Image: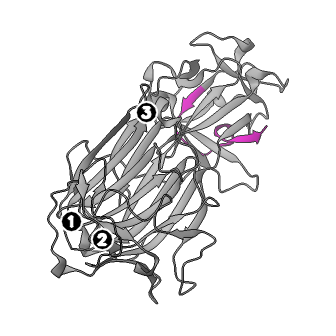
Amino acid sequence: MFPKNRAFLLFILLTTNYVSAIGREGLKLIFENTFDSSSTLNTSIWNYNYPWGSTYNHQANMIRRQVTTSELGQVKLTAIATRTSNITNLDTGDYGIVNVNYTSGAIYTNSFLTLKRGLTVVSMRVPSTTSTWPMIMLVPLDETSPMLIMDVFNDRRNIGYTFRYTSQTGSSESVGGVARASVDSSLDFHSYAIDWGYDKISFLVDNVLLRSFTKPTEITQISDMSLVIALGVGGRSQFTPTNSSVYPTALLVNSVQMWTPKFDGRFKIVNLNSRLVLEVENGVFTDFARVTQNIDKGTLWQQWDIHYVGYNTYRISNVNSRKVLDDYDWQTNDGAKIVQYKFESKDNQIWKIIEDEDTDTDNTVSLINVWAQKAASFVGASNQTGSQLVLNEINDQPDQKWLLVRL
């Protein structure tokens, strides 16, 4: 998945404590480019510069000839101290007025390769020149909000991350932060990753979580996002000092991956042991209603919408009641009841969907509660109608396995 023999960064996180790495369970790899099959970029996938033109919020004009590929299977974006634009006073909006005295390179995925939600991973080695501003962005093709951004700025230990969106009043707002790496990030290749679902956005380096933001309302603004990889000059301030004598300098890109949620959609959920379907008992709408198994009657309360929360997890909502599977009272003991409850973005309402590699049937999975770390099953592996759905220690038995039948 990631480059071999890479020195991993350790972080002094300014915003959060360490959280476990993101996995790939429940995700599907839809695109991977290691840049080793051709001496040029695949222009059916990649375009040059930015989706909106050749300048952005820094001191470099982007042109195609500053993007090259190497025999090592790397894309090279090179910044030089040469003016190739007539722009003298560029209003960056964010960082004031700057002169465009440098030239560099940027690439982006075109409209044939965009992502609505999922995980994007870029392996790259940033230049040691501290006045460069390497970044990855996920953006709409028209440069409007929202934007998801990761950048390295000033000394090579500052890793920034930002979610920019439009507020309810129409103004531009953002959430984000900075992680401080323990070593210079220009010394080796590292993976920079952005993950988002219906509820949560996460930023990672070397598969270590820097920060997650739960912003379900703002995330609805995200649609088809294009990946931009760019080497800017100057960073986060119009007063960032630049020294032309240390140019040219280059950003090296080793690989790009895009993953999409595998189980987004509407399903029947069939227990592999009993062959009965999961339902809300009697189709009631109330919180704490029992979740049981029954023969398939084709009712709405036997149908479930599975939505990618983000960070490799899902919520499972009943189509009839619009309420989610919930570990009642945050219990962690075997036999803890699973009920329906209004969604509140809590860990006891969030699930990992783990594919079963031991069966020949597609979409056979285990449902693991994120809070309890236990599997959805039935007491005594019951195959009786009306049996209560509960949590039990993971044992890989048929009553803990489910067939997701897409509707």
Check disc 3 and give the amino acid type.
Lys
In the drawing, does residue 96 fall left or right of residue 103? left
Q: Which residues are magenta?
A: 390-407
Farthest right residue in view:
297
Q: Residue furthest bottom?
A: 71
Q: In the image, what residue occupies the spot 43% across and 47% down?
A: 147
- Decide which of tag 1 and tag 3 comes sooner along the chain: 1
Q: Residue at x 47, y 23 (%)?
A: 344
Q: Is residue 403 magenta?
A: yes
Observer-nearest of 299 and 371: 299
Name the secondary structure under disc 3.
loop
Q: Secondary structure at mark 2?
A: loop
Q: Position of residue 103 (x, y in %)?
A: 33, 74
Can residue 216 be spotted in the picture? yes
> Which quarter of the figure has residue 2?
bottom left
Q: Are marks 3 and 2 in contact (CB under 8 Å)?
A: no
Q: Give the CA distance from mark 3 to mark 2.
A: 30 Å
Instruction: Residue under label 1, please give it.
Output: 156
- The mark that comes first in sequence, 2 or 1, is 2
Q: Hey, what amino acid is under mark 2?
A: Val
Mark 1 residue element:
loop
* Residue sitting at x 61%, y 60%: 113
Which of the labelled discs sits on residue 126, or is there none? 2
